[in-house]
Image: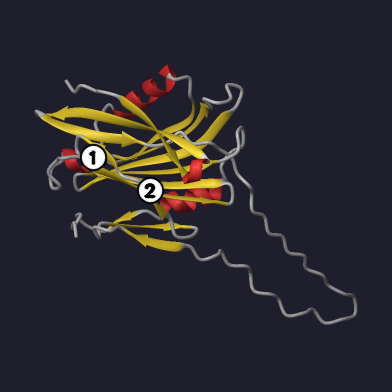
Amino acid sequence: MSSVNLKEDEHKIADGLTGRYSLTWDNSFEGEKFMIGILSRLLAAVLLLTISALAQTHAGRPLPHPRPAPTAPRWYIFAGPDRDFVVEFPSAPKRMSDNEAPGGTARNYVLVKDGLTFRLHFIDTGLDPGSREGNQLPLDFRREMLEHARERGWTVVRAELVHRNVYEQETWSPMKSNAAGSLHYIERDVVRHGRQYILTCASLIPDKKADASLCRRFLDSFRVTGEPQPQ
């Protein structure tokens, strides 16, 4: 039976605008420890970006040539320093301080833009990159996540095991500094080649939902391209 050991540690990020909790899970797979991190419960909210276009026609006049449909702005393509993944941010993220964990060094990249926080956090689990355990989440991962949320008074809107190695959760969590306010975020956990990746898209204004389209673009852009190749 796997054992789960939770460890929380609060850190400051993004020039003091937000704070986060780091959660470590140690799961035993045939005597090995599987460390899984959960990221940030960040200060929240969103400035929704809206663009509208008006088309006019005039009686008795030829219709003007149609304008090309507006295209989505180009995002910054961030390639992993160990050549193991790519992900898109709205612009270049900032490298934050590393965190030491039992499995090694947890690396953090953060971007605060347009009322949202985009965060990527990854760490080696210590498992064989080619093993089954190093390429899938524990069978009880979803249950443990929901139990953890319930114990802390978080409201889970959605909890989905997308694939055997991908879990996504949408949550409202109470603010420490304002008991009446809650923070909204969407988080995705990915395990591949013995490495744990956590992507978080969170709003910066209490009681406001994060922009779903921007969060979805960020989360869905993540791709594992191969085994980590430390430089």
Residue found farthest to the right: 60
**Residue depicted at 46% across the width and 33% down the height:** 41
Q: Are marks 1 and 2 in contact (CB under 8 Å)?
A: no
Quick one: 178 or 74, which is closer to the camera?
178
Identify the residue position indicated by label 1 in the image. Answer: 136
Q: SS for tag 2?
A: loop
Identify the residue position indicated by label 2 in the image. Answer: 96
**Residue depicted at 19% across the width and 23% down the height:** 2
**Residue depicted at 45% across the width and 52% down the height:** 218
Q: Say which quadrant the N terminus sits in.
A: top left
Residue 8 placed where, x, y %?
A: 34, 27
Residue 22 placed where, x, y %?
A: 35, 33
Residue 212 placed where, x, y %?
A: 55, 45
- Quarter of the image for residue 28 reads top left
- Quarter of the image for residue 180 reads top right
Left-right relation of 135 to 85: left
Q: SS for tag 1?
A: loop
